[in-house]
Amino acid sequence: MRQLSELDASFLYLESETTPMHIGGIYLFDASEREKPLAFSTFVAYLRSRLHVVPVFRQRLKEIPLRLGRPYWIDDPDFSIERHLAYVNLGEHGRKASLMTLASRILEEPLKRDRPLWHITFVDGFKLDEQDTGSDGFALIVKLHHAAIDAFSGEEIIGKLLEYTPEPSPIAPPRPWQPRPEPSEERVMLQAGANIIRTPLQFTSLAFNAAEATARGLIQKQLRKLPLPLPLFSAPNSPFNRQITANRQIVAPSVELSRLKAIKAFLGDVTLNDVVLGLCAEALKRYLISEGANADKSLVAMTPISVRSNSLRRATGNQMSAMLLDLATDETDPAQRIRRIHWNAVASEPYREAIAADRLTELLPSTMLALSARLYSELQIAQRYQPVFNLPITNVPGPQVPLYLQGARLVQQYNTAPLFDSMGLVIVAVSYEGRLTLNFTTCPDVVAHGESLQSHVDESLNAIEAAMERLGTEATKEPIAASPTQTLADDAMTAMEGLLKKALKRFRA
């Protein structure tokens, strides 16, 4: 049995009907070079032959009775690949708009917990050319639960399932697989007891979970009385930070990676990730202005950081940390903003030395993390006060060489990440074969006119290049002052220090 980490388990406990916690992918393939279209049955046979490269595809969750501990991954003795696949033929409606609408509907549905946490929809009849009447393409709509992977390992899994040559390799028979016996309830209970002994705070998690209903009522009653002046909640109010519904919309503009690299080369001491964040910041600012929202205060992003190493590298689980980063949207010059973003990033401790998220969460049980998130939502802290951050932005480097599936070339991929309450927008940037795609996953009931982000990205890149030309090479060497929100962690510590001083003063009195 392999137990989920606290971070992995928290994605299970955070899930609800309106907040499915899976990572999504939409992969478009050009099959025009094949002698005949790729049949669904051929795809199923191909996938069967490669299941061994992703063990989690045949593992399901084993829950601990009474939630005495985190769930385990175990081999699914009833595994059937047919339960994880679906076939759709778009027919005469096989255009990109129809595909994205279909994907939005599919990605709204949570994965079923009684089986391995993944699902693939094979979409036939997809037309790559909007003017073409043929059916030379197909698409895959993939769902993988965030408890099993993060965005970085998800990209690795797809790379393992696909091929690096246009010549279709013979489909081998599936490797023999015998599921390991499901552990008995007695062994599971013994293991849970051993874990509680090793980590006493897990028992706190159990007690906290047992008293959850009472605790939530008491905490809500007390917190509603507080003005919550903590500097930690210093991200500005924005249209993105409202209660979400189950509806989803995917907007995915793409730009040439060479243009972003040229900006990086010109500005000098910045990274390509800084340029990507600068492009996102300019597009978001333009969106806020177009919607008549206040864009005077700088947006704050949560940016995940992969902390995988060569000695600890597996294709599943979440191995990442995160940092809060000021996007400097209050800066009027979009080229200077990139330099400021870089300064904000390098001034942050996680940028220099990332700490694995499972180390950060081992002292905070996953059930407590989930309860905190629910309270954050139910108390509407992001609306009544200010959010901790405005949106997550993840940049996942992808392969720059073409990938294939039985001779069909992958021409485009779109990626989505989970939304959760009070967070109606998330951005996942993925590069592939010389292009970078900014994948905006939105709740359309929160982020109105989300389709306008497509044009905002194009306009933003042009604006950055124009500002870069005006800036001149000498200006790029001028020092940049860090933005105030780089000290979010310090502000939180200062607030905690003040509370402790007051408590000690009362105790002495």
Image (cartoon, grey):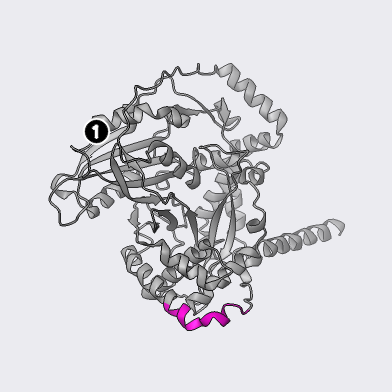
- Quadrant where the N terminus sits is top right
Frontmost residue, 14 versus 335: 335
The answer to which of 43 and 389 lies nearer the viewer is 43
Front residue of 172/442: it is 172
* SS assignment at label 1: helix
Residue 19 seen: yes
Q: Is residue 98 above or below residue 167?
A: below
Give amino acid for label 1: Phe
Circle 1 residues within 10 Å: few <14, some 14–19, many ≥20: some
Which residue is painted at 62% across and 42% down in the image? 358
- Residue shown at 73%/64% (left/top)? 494
Picture quadrant where residue 501 is located:
bottom right
Outermost residue, right side: 508
Query: Which residue is under mark 1?
Result: 40
Magenta span main SS: helix
Side of 147 where 121 appears, left or right: left
Is residue 188 located in the magenta-colored stretch of the structure? no
Q: Residue 285 lies in what quarter of the image?
A: bottom left
477 in the magenta segment: yes
Q: Which residues are magenta?
A: 466-478
Q: Give how far across and how far down residue 196 sits, in percent.
A: 68, 30
- Residue 21: tell me if it is visible: no
Q: Is residue 327 left or right of residue 399?
A: right
Residue 499 placement (x, y as % from top left): 74, 60
Q: How many marks?
A: 1
Q: Quadrant of the C terminus?
A: bottom right
Give the percent coordinates (x, y) of residue 306. Answer: 56, 49
Residue, x 44% and y 39% (percent of image)?
Answer: 157
Looking at the picture, does residue 145 appear above or below residue 479? above
Q: Position of residue 284 (x, y in %)?
A: 43, 68
Foreground: 16 or 275?
275
